[in-house]
Image (cartoon, grey):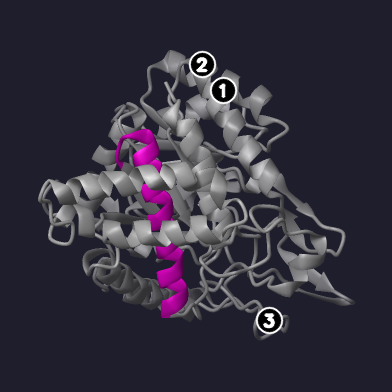
């Protein structure tokens, strides 16, 4: 690729998964308004995350990246709080099991867009543009609701700012206190049908906290125990939005996409000569890229060399989404190939997207057993290759939804319609997410 880069250079490449804006002039005007808005995150915060991800790549920390499949403009403060609560609970379990820091990155405050397999959707004899997330159009099936509206880019910015404000208040205002989070986990262990399996780990954490108190440590006054660092991320899909929020850092002169701390490229847009790769190669944020079962060795090595030619530790996270039946065959060759290049990569498993199927009642779903099996295959592959299983990437909610089958409540097909609320992909509910955390804790405690 050419070394010449600007926030607009992606426009010279093929940009997939972009909306069909009905009024290009309106998009230009909206982008100018966005460009005048304050950044949502700051360059120094993104650099901090890069350093923490470098520790993950060395096996000195573990990455927990989780959140909604597609955020809604209508999400309540309670829903955002409960999603954060589940992530904090999972992090405590993983921190204790791994004996190392857990880097907490949310799919939050920007995950408003979704790639689609088709540009249109048909219901009956009516064909309309596909729903591409609230940043583009509405989920309702009418011509007006499915029209791509540039003003939604501004709505996404404002919604992201409000969400960030709430998240920062929760993570700094005592909500994330370690004793409080542990008490929530104890409640889960007591109430969950599978809780007995996790009681020993919960009791170990409880004894550790009791020991600290006995040593005179006031947990409520230790900032490291009652506050957490929490970073944001989303798929950098709608390039007009990302371009408008890209800023030149006054300290370093580097460009940062200030819409989130971390951005990733999806499986459908990871083409080496495509617009998304061109745009993200020029910003200094830590970057991710989804890698599915069709990815070749040349694809993955090319991604690393394109996005990280200077081989900066913590710069690249490869998020594998193979499917439980394929991961043990498809992942090892990629691990070996990247290992041979000497690139420092954070390897993360997304066990959700490769395990999606349609249930008997027509709902799109995923089974808990397949999710945890793909995670197990991820750890097994890294153990065999001598590489680091660095983290997990999950779609989840704190709400009591019934979108994924199995788990602690043993959900079956007939349960799906009871609380199927997602706008796009099925998510783990809070109970299922914590169950995953305890399963991963077992794997993490024996990781080499």
Is 91 above or below relative to 305? Answer: below
Labels 1 & 2 near each other (Cβ < 8 A): yes
Which residue does the numbered mark 2 point to in the structure image? Answer: 385
Question: Mark 3 or 2 closer to N-term?
Answer: 3
- The 10 Å Cα crowd at callout 3, few under 14, some 14 to 19, many 20 or more, is few
Quadrant holding the C terminus: top left
Q: What stretch of residues is rendered in magenta?
A: 77-101
Q: Is residue 254 magenta?
A: no
Residue sitting at x 13%, y 57%:
218
Residue 297 seen anywhere in this rendered image of the structure? no
State the separation of the CA atoms marked 3 and 1. 42 Å
Which residue does the numbered mark 1 point to in the structure image? Answer: 381
Element class at badge 3: loop
Q: Is residue 99 magenta?
A: yes
Query: Which image quadrant for residue 165?
Result: bottom left
Element class at badge 1: helix
Query: Which image quadrant for residue 447?
Result: top left
Q: Nearer the viewer, residue 416 or 164?
A: 416
Residue at far front of view:
214
Element class at badge 2: helix
Residue sitting at x 55%, y 72%:
136
Which residue does the numbered mark 3 point to in the structure image? Answer: 140
Residue sitting at x 59%, y 44%:
267
In front: mark 3 or mark 1? 1
Residue sitting at x 65%, y 36%:
373
Residue 338 seen anywhere in this rendered image of the structure? yes
Q: Nearer the viewer, residue 253 or 436?
A: 436
């Amino acid at each position: 690729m050419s070394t010449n880069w600007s926030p607009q250079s992606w426009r010279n490449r093929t940009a997939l998964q972009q909306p069909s804006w009905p009024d290009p002039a309106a998009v230009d005007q909206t982008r100018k308004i966005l460009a005048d808005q304050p950044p949502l995150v700051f360059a120094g915060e993104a650099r901090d995350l890069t350093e923490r991800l470098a520790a993950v790549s060395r096996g000195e920390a573990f990455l927990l990246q989780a959140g909604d499949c597609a955020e809604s403009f209508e999400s309540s403060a309670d829903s955002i709080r409960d999603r954060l609560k589940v992530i904090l609970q999972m992090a405590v379990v993983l921190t204790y099991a791994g004996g190392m820091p857990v880097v907490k990155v949310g799919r939050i405050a920007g995950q408003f867009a979704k790639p689609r397999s088709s540009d249109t959707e048909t219901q009956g004899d009516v064909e309309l543009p596909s729903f591409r997330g609230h940043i583009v159009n509405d989920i309702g099936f009418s011509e007006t609701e499915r029209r791509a509206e540039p003003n939604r880019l501004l709505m996404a910015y404002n919604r992201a700012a409000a969400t960030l404000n709430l998240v920062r208040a929760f993570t700094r205002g005592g909500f994330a206190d370690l004793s409080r989070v542990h008490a929530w986990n104890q409640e889960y262990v007591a109430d969950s049908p599978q809780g007995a399996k996790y009681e020993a780990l919960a009791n170990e954490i409880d004894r550790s906290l009791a020991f600290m108190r006995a040593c005179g440590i006031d947990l409520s006054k230790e900032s490291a125990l009652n506050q957490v660092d929490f970073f944001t991320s989303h798929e950098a899909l709608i390039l007009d939005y990302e371009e408008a929020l890209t800023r030149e850092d006054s300290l370093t002169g580097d460009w940062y996409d200030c819409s989130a701390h971390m951005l990733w490229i999806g499986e459908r847009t990871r083409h080496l000569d495509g617009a998304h790769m061109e745009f993200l190669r020029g910003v200094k944020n830590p970057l991710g890229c989804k890698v599915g079962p069709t990815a070749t060795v040349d694809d993955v090595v090319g991604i690393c060399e394109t996005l990280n030619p200077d081989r900066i530790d913590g710069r690249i996270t490869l998020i594998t989404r193979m499917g439980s039946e394929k991961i043990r065959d498809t992942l090892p060759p990629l691990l070996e190939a990247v290992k041979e290049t000497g690139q420092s990569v954070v390897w993360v498993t997304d066990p959700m997207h490769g395990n999606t199927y349609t249930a008997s009642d027509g709902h799109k779903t995923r089974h808990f057993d397949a999710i945890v099996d793909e995670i197990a295959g991820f750890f097994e592959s890294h153990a065999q290759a001598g590489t680091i299983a660095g983290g997990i990437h999950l779609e989840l909610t704190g709400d009591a939804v019934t979108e994924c089958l199995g788990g602690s409540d043993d959900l079956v097909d007939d349960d799906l319609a009871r609380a199927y609320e997602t706008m796009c992909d099925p998510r783990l509910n809070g109970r299922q997410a914590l169950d995953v955390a305890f399963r991963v804790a077992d794997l993490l405690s024996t990781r080499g």
